[in-house]
Image: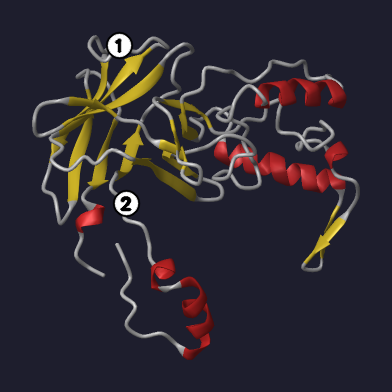
Amino acid sequence: MRFRCVLVLASLLPLATSLGCDALGANAFAGTIMQLTVANASVTPPGQHLELWARDQFDDIIRIRPFYDETNFETTFGLMVRQAISLDDPCLIDAEGHLLTDASAYPGPVTIAGVTQSPAQQAKQVVDRINQLAPPGQTPLLAVLPYDPNTPPTLPAGTAPADRLAACTAYRNKGPLTYIANPLQITAPAHGTVYGFIRFISVSPAEDYDGFRLDTPINLAGVQEIFFTTETDNVDPNHRGPLYLTSMRTTSGREVVHFELVHADAGGTESGGAALYVNLDQDSTQ
């Protein structure tokens, strides 16, 4: 989509003169934006991940490759579902390796808006937030992530901060997709990428998460079906793994294709929906 240079405000004249009309444009996006919601899913078993496929109008099966870094146009195949955050995560640490759930991670009292918190209270605030997203004895918030075969380190509770920092740094350095949660902002991981979340509602305090977004450079105009399969590291497009979720196309709107997602097994509980925004580069609106 390209903005038309019809009227330029006086304050922008130097910019327009130096950069030219094209500098105020926006590049067309020829791929597909996919908004999905899934309920009642569970953590992906070790050694497995999910692959997303699409069947086009020619009955060709396309393996979907979402962006995990749109700034650098980095894409990767595969998805996985992991617990978004846990009190047992050894890599929820500060720059010196102290657990954020421990008072040692906080150098002293802080005062915000007239309220002073001790180091112990700051740590408890993080613990309370994690308990909200991972309620004891209940299903926790689950994150939808780019597939990464690496797993976080397992460390004893009494591990020294320096040793914990070394282990977590080694895990982080295994690749750009190793996931480390951020209890202060769950949508912005301390490392890695999160596409979104499986449907989740917390009770105290009330909060809900529902949905994930996948952007792919592949234009899926004419798509007839999407489906997920369960795969191991060796994915063979000609011999795909077991079906996980299948789809039924429903009423669609302008340049948007809607699907209902259902579990491939009649006994499965996973379900959801998908909206695919296609032909975004063909919209005549300026």
Q: Tell me the crowding category of disc 2: few under 14, some 14 to 19, or many 20 or more residues within 10 angstroms, Cα based.
A: some
- C-alpha distance separating marks 2 and 1: 29 Å
Q: Taking 170 as reference, is 67 left or right?
A: left
Q: Amino acid at mark 2?
A: Phe
Say which element carries label 1.
Answer: loop
Provide the residue designation for mark 2: 29
In which quadrant of the rendered view does residue 98 lie? top right
Residue 164 lies, with reference to residue 253, above or below; the image says: above
Q: Residue furthest left?
A: 58
Q: Taking 98 as reference, is 142 left or right?
A: left
Residue 184 at x, y = what percent? 66, 47
Q: Tell me the crowding category of disc 1: few under 14, some 14 to 19, or many 20 or more residues within 10 angstroms, Cα based.
A: few
Residue 267: mark in rendering: none
In which quadrant of the rendered view does residue 97 lie? top right
Residue 246 at x, y = what percent? 21, 27
Provide the residue designation for mark 1: 236
Residue 9 at x, y = what percent? 44, 87
In which quadrant of the rendered view does residue 188 lie? top right
Say which element carries label 2.
Answer: loop
Residue at 21%, 21% (x, y): give it.
264
Mark 2, mark 1: which one is toward the viewer? 2
Q: How many marks?
A: 2
Residue 102 lies, with reference to residue 119, above or below; the image says: above
- The image's colouring method is secondary structure
Q: Which of the pair 127/8 is nearer the observer?
A: 8
Quadrant, the N terminus: bottom left
Q: Amino acid at mark 1?
A: Asp
Q: Residue furthest right?
A: 108
Quadrant, the C terminus: bottom left
